[in-house]
Image (tube, rainbow, N blue to C red):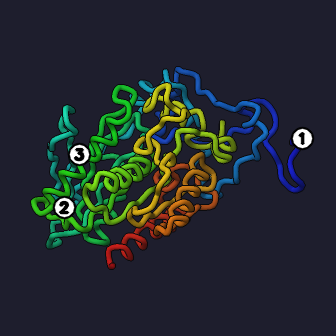
Amino acid sequence: MRTGPPAGEQWCQGPVGTHRRTGRTGVWPRPEGAALTTQPTTSRNAADRDAPCPPPLDPELAAVLEPIADRLPPGFPPEAIPEIRAGLVVPPPTDEDLGRGGAFEIEERTVPGPPGAPDVSLLVCRPVHERGPLPAVYHMHGGGMITGNNRMGVDEMLDLSEELGLVVVSVEYRLAPEHPHPAPVEDCYAGLVWTAENAREIGVDPARIVVAGGSAGGGLTAALALLARDRGGPAVFGQMLLCPMLDDRNDSCSARQMAGHGVWDRTANETAWGALLGDARGGPDVSPYAAPARATDLSGLPPAFIDVGSAETFRDEDVAYAARIWQVGGRAELHVWPGGFHGFDGLAPKASLSREARAARENWLRRLLST
């Protein structure tokens, strides 16, 4: 029975929350002076308390988090979901914002959704001065499956487009808990099918569609690659998984290590997976199209880019997913950014680590599209 830390290693001790580090919920900061009226919670059971302390944050990133720590609880319970949604204080970018001074033509398309379900909205951003057909990034936003819209996270995709000449297509999918699995991934698949079948109409090369997303959107990206493979659907040229949310079991070392710490801790993760899966969360019958870490076969998938911070809940499940792709002879590039918290490059875009992470994504995509 373990009674203390190995030599040279310090474990977190003391009451729950004593050593809580700065962090954010994975969405946006609340206004100064505001706080959730629902008490933030953690899930630090005995096993969590025995877990090693989290890795240290990168100093630049820690300095960004420190002033807003009181507005960014690491976890929240299911009853706080409405308040989390209401607290999104950053308005989505307008068409004018996304157009970047006339560099992009912005269009919203309404396309058929899954059978028997509502139509799906696609945000299409086309470079004005590029001649098509062009490669495309098909984007799925983050937000823990419970919040967000198809304009969230598009700015980074447009940065890639400006460098590489891409069409960006971002899908609006239904959110949990009102619309549990399989609604989100089926919406994403329906939008992908429409994009591939109508590629020429929107200036896209159907043979070079890369799927991409961060956090929950990263999990949907991985699920979409599996679904397209298994259904013989649209050919996916590559998959870009940015700090992806992959495993509903929520029991990795990093999940326990980060409980009560940082950004999007184990409790927030439990809330999100519970919203998506209900009582099935963590059980034996979860679909890999909901939680891609449950897939038993990762062969035959498109090349993958996977990145994650060392100081975040998803670290170990993301590293394991890359390793399993390699084990079946697949192609994956993995980056674990030392001292990075969940979504660090979005909150601290000017930090050195953030610039390195974004450069690595651009370089991978450039290499992929050159083949």
Task: Please tell me the numbered disc located at residue 190.
Answer: 3
Mark positioned earlier in the residue sequence (2 or 3): 2
Amino acid bearing label 2 = Arg
**Residue 52: x %, y % from top left:** 76, 46
- For label 2, the residue is 126
Q: Nearer the viewer, mark 1 or mark 2?
A: 1
Q: Is residue 206 above or below residue 341?
A: below
Mark positioned earlier in the residue sequence (1 or 2): 1
Q: Is residue 68 above or below residue 326?
A: above
Q: Nearer the viewer, mark 3 or mark 1?
A: 3
Name which residue lies at 33% across and 63% down. 159
Query: Which of 295/197 is in front?
Result: 295
- For label 1, the residue is 3
* Residue 51 falls in image quadrant: top right
Task: Please tell me the numbered disc located at residue 34.
Answer: none
Name which residue lies at 59% across and 39% down. 250
Q: Is residue 246 left or right of residue 16?
A: left
